[in-house]
Amino acid sequence: MRARGCTVIGLLLTALMLFPVYWMLNVSLTPQQDMRKSPPDLLPLHPTFEGYRAVLHDQLPIWAPVC
């Protein structure tokens, strides 16, 4: 029984530590008009890579023709 409790605690801590990574990906794929939506979607309904395109175009212009 003790091993099961340690496993549950380990899984909860892992989920807690991975949540910021999930949220960063979620927000990065959310369209700009949905950013201030309340309550926020747990998964973007219409994901977009426009933010990534803008970063590559503005900060790494050598990659602009690729996107």
Image (tube, rainbow, N blue to C red):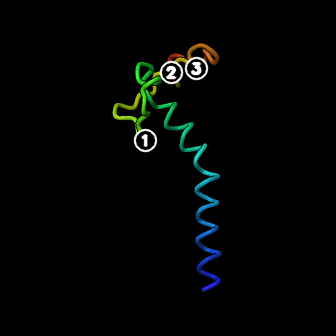
- Label 3 crowd bin: few (<14), some (14–19), many (20+), radius 10 Å: few
- Name the residue at 41% across, 24% down: 34
Q: Quadrant of residue 39?
A: top left
Q: Position of residue 49 (x, y in %)?
A: 45, 27
Residue that mark 3 sits on: 55
- Image vertical order of residue 55 relative to residue 42, above or below: above
Task: Between label 3 and label 1, give the one nearer the viewer.
Answer: 1
Residue that mark 1 sits on: 42
Amino acid type assigned to the residue bearing label 1 in the image: Leu
Q: CA distance from mark 2 to mark 1?
A: 23 Å
- Image vertical order of residue 20 relative to residue 52, above or below: below
Q: Which residue is the extreme one toward the bottom?
A: 1
- Name the residue at 65% across, 75% down: 6
Q: Position of residue 26 (x, y in %)?
A: 49, 37
Asked whether the beta carbons under mark 2 and mark 3 sit within 8 Å of each other, the answer is yes
Q: Quadrant of residue 24?
A: top right
Amino acid type assigned to the residue bearing label 3 in the image: Val
Amino acid type assigned to the residue bearing label 2 in the image: Arg
Q: Which residue is the extreme one toward the left?
A: 45
> Which quadrant of the rendered structure holds the N terminus?
bottom right
- Name the residue at 58% across, 48% down: 19
Q: CA distance from mark 3 to mark 1?
A: 24 Å
- Label 2 crowd bin: few (<14), some (14–19), many (20+), radius 10 Å: some
- Label 1 crowd bin: few (<14), some (14–19), many (20+), radius 10 Å: few
Question: Which label belongs to residue 53?
Answer: 2
**In screen coordinates, is 32 left or right of 19?**
left
- Name the residue at 63% across, 68% down: 9
Q: Position of residue 16 (x, y in %)?
A: 61, 53
Q: Which of 25/9 is in front?
A: 9
Disc on the earlier residue, 2 or 1: 1
- Image vertical order of residue 5 relative to residue 22, above or below: below
Disc on the earlier residue, 3 or 1: 1
